[in-house]
Amino acid sequence: MHRTDLTDVATHEAKALSVSLFRRLAELEKGSAEYACVRNTLVELNLSLVKYSACRFRGRSEPMEDIVQVGTIGLIKATNRFDPERGVEFASFAMPTITGEIKRFFRDTSWAVKVPAGSRSCGSTWPRRATPWNRPSAASPRMPSSPGTCT
């Protein structure tokens, strides 16, 4: 069976292939072209984890493509940190990282209080409270005539 698109691989095939690719990745030198190729293959192979996790956040205000993109960053981080010698499945290790990255995205991009759109866009036009620094005065600030005197 020869496939060029790794996103159509069945779940059980992806698990088996991921195990062998992670073993291969552990043998390679970080930064080499082959290491990058194997790592990228692992990311493409496990994109279904990102899509599954992103579906939980489908009804939010952000476009689905953005959610998947942020989830993919979490998948890349999980791929870089995964250690196959620990005996944990990659999906079990990666899902909290992917979901956490998506939640962080929503935390950083959404408002804590629902503010009307008009108020958000005109926030800079609200009047400022008068302080001694922005209050208009008749006299302009002057430098002291001699050091140590303030007149």
Image: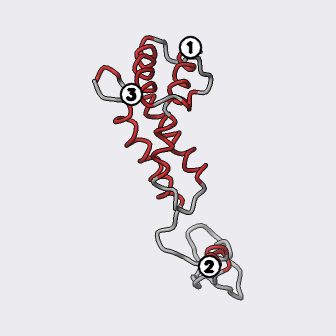
**Marked residue nearer the N-terminal end (3 or 1):** 1
Residue at the (58%, 58%) spot, across then down: 62
**Foreground of the two, 23 or 122:** 23
Q: How far apart are marks 3 and 1 (CA)?
A: 18 Å
Quadrant assignment for the N terminus: top right
- Number of numbered discs present? 3
The three-letter amino acid code for the residue at tag 2 is Ser
Query: Secondary structure under badge 2?
Result: helix
Q: Of callouts 3 and 2, which one flags the residue occurring earlier in the amino acid sequence?
A: 3
Up/down of 41 relative to 107, above or below: above
**What x and y, as percent, mark residue 69?**
57, 44
Dot 1: element: helix
Locate the C terminus and report the quarter of the image it occupies. Answer: bottom right
Residue pointed to by mark 2: 119
The image shows residue 139 at horizontal and vertical percentages of: 70, 85
Tell me the CA gap for discs 3 and 2.
45 Å
Position of residue 141 relative to residue 50, above or below, is below
* Callouts 2 and 1 close, C-beta under 8 Å: no
At 44% from the left and 23% from the top, the residue drawn is 18
Residue at 47% over, 58% down: 107
Q: What residue type is labelled 3?
A: Phe
Q: Mark 1 points at which residue?
A: 34
Q: Which of 97 and 13 is in front in this view?
A: 13
Q: What element carries label 3?
A: loop
Picture residue at 44% right of the left edge, 31% below the top: 11
> Which one is closest to the eye, mark 3 or mark 2?
3
Color style of the picture: secondary structure
Q: In which quarter of the image is residue 123?
A: bottom right
First-in-chain label (2 vs 1): 1
Say few, some or many: other residues with alpha carbon within 10 Å of mark 3 (under 14 / 14 to 19 / 20 or more). Answer: some
Q: Name the residue under label 3.
A: 82
